[in-house]
Amino acid sequence: MTLTAPAAPALSTDEVLALRRDFPLLQREGLVYLDSTATSQRPRQVLDAEVAYVEHEHAAVHRGAHTLAAEATERFEEARGTVAAFIGADDDEVVWTSGATAALNLVAGAIGNASAGRGGAEADRFRLREGDEVVVTELEHHADLVPWQELALRTGATLRWIPVDDDGALRMDEAARIVGPRTRVLAFSHVSNVLGAVNPVADLVALAREHGALTVLDACQSVPHLPFDVRTLGVDLVAFSGHKMLGPTGIGALWGRREVLNALPPFLTGGSMITTVTMERSEYLPAPQRFEAGTQPTSQAIGLAEAVRYLQGVGMERVAAHEAAIGDRLAEGLDAIDGVRLLGPRPGAPRVGLASFVVDGVHAHDVGQVLDEAGVAVRVGHHCAQPLHRRLGVTASTRASGYVYTTEDEVDRFLEATVQAVRFFGVRS
Ligand SMILES: Cc1ncc(COP(=O)(O)O)c(C=O)c1O
């Protein structure tokens, strides 16, 4: 689960080139796509699976009594099983959402509902009161920060956070001070979407457990990139998105321990999540359906299951090894450029296949524009992590992020274009 000793060899250049042939978009002439942390590209297999389902099996799931609806439901539930197995979970512990943002809002919203008195006695453990604390970290994506801010505002709980050091590493000495008897929820990301650093999940879970706090893991940047097993990690809830792991947009998942999911009151309410409804009140189904109100994203779920099969075909150990190699090449190359400040772990330290940087005195948008002119697509801005950027003393950065289809040659083309950008802006002679 750490990146220190890859358990499998990285992909060879020939293997990556063979994989790339599966990705229609990567055939675009002259494009170097280094924005996979924002969203990944989809292989033909995923596109075909979605189309085949829509052409031959599409119907509303869990509703109709006709044969087509039964087939669609079967395919939809098979997809759930595939995604559940990929993360070491049981099928009924995986809730479909539209993405990680929706999954995290679901958890914060359900805790908010419990705090407002919803749910039975089993929801007592989730009720927040004034003086209770919700703890996050300073490096969270806004999707794992703003819902907790809102929850704290709604309930009177206090939001606290574990700070980072100058390299963006979590201050674990501070964590031990901040997570305490008043902590009810500890929410943190597995891998930083800005720094590529892997956070010490086991240590954070141990701290939370000591105080009986619920742990919520934002695994948006780890499920796509590392072997991932919910039981080994020991957290209570996990959120991730399909479009960052070769799958479609509009689909993601929340995993939760069965007993946690079934004790939480619903967040969204409506059709398909109830047993009986009278004009006065409703009874809810157990998880996962109690969190899946409304018509479900069926073709997206089927596409995500196909993406999972694709990643399993490559092997997640090998995906991780390839990413470690890409991450090292990016970090070493950027660190060697005069006038460039690499953010996050030093070259050689564990990171997934991404690196963010700033060019002295030049706005990230200007760097991004020069790179774009060279055909290199990167992300510029605060990457939905303003507090982290503020802590690192910058307003914005440029992020290059690869994936299973990224070649060493692409990384080198990006590095050459960055050298050109630095020269263009006259940062160093
Ligand atoms: C770490 C992290 N958390 C949450 C999200 C939100 O994911 P989505 O926009 O797919 O809901 C992202 C997306 O960039 C992310 O990188």
Image (tube, rainbow, N blue to C red):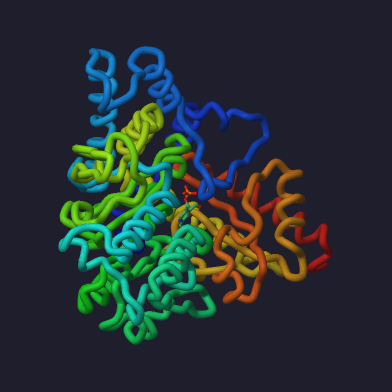
Nearer-the-camera pick, 253 or 122:
122
Residue in the image at 75% along x and 50% along y: 369
On the picture, is 415 further left or further right than 155?
right
Image quarter in which the C terminus is found: bottom right
Q: Quadrant of residue 260?
A: bottom left
What x and y, as percent, mark residue 66? 24, 14
Q: Quadrant of residue 72?
A: top left
Q: Is 167 placed above or below 355 here?
A: below
Residue 314 seen: no
On the picture, is 136 further left or further right than 81?
right
What x and y, as percent, mark residue 60? 33, 23
Q: Is 361 placed above or below 60 here?
A: below
Q: Which residue of the protein is positioned furthest toward the front in this rendering?
A: 279
Nearer-the-camera pick, 264 or 38:
264
Residue 257 seen: yes
Residue in the image at 20% along x and 55% along y: 257
What x and y, as percent, mark residue 333? 60, 60
On the picture, is 218 further left or further right than 370?
left
Q: Quadrant of residue 304?
A: top left
What x and y, as percent, mark residue 356? 58, 61
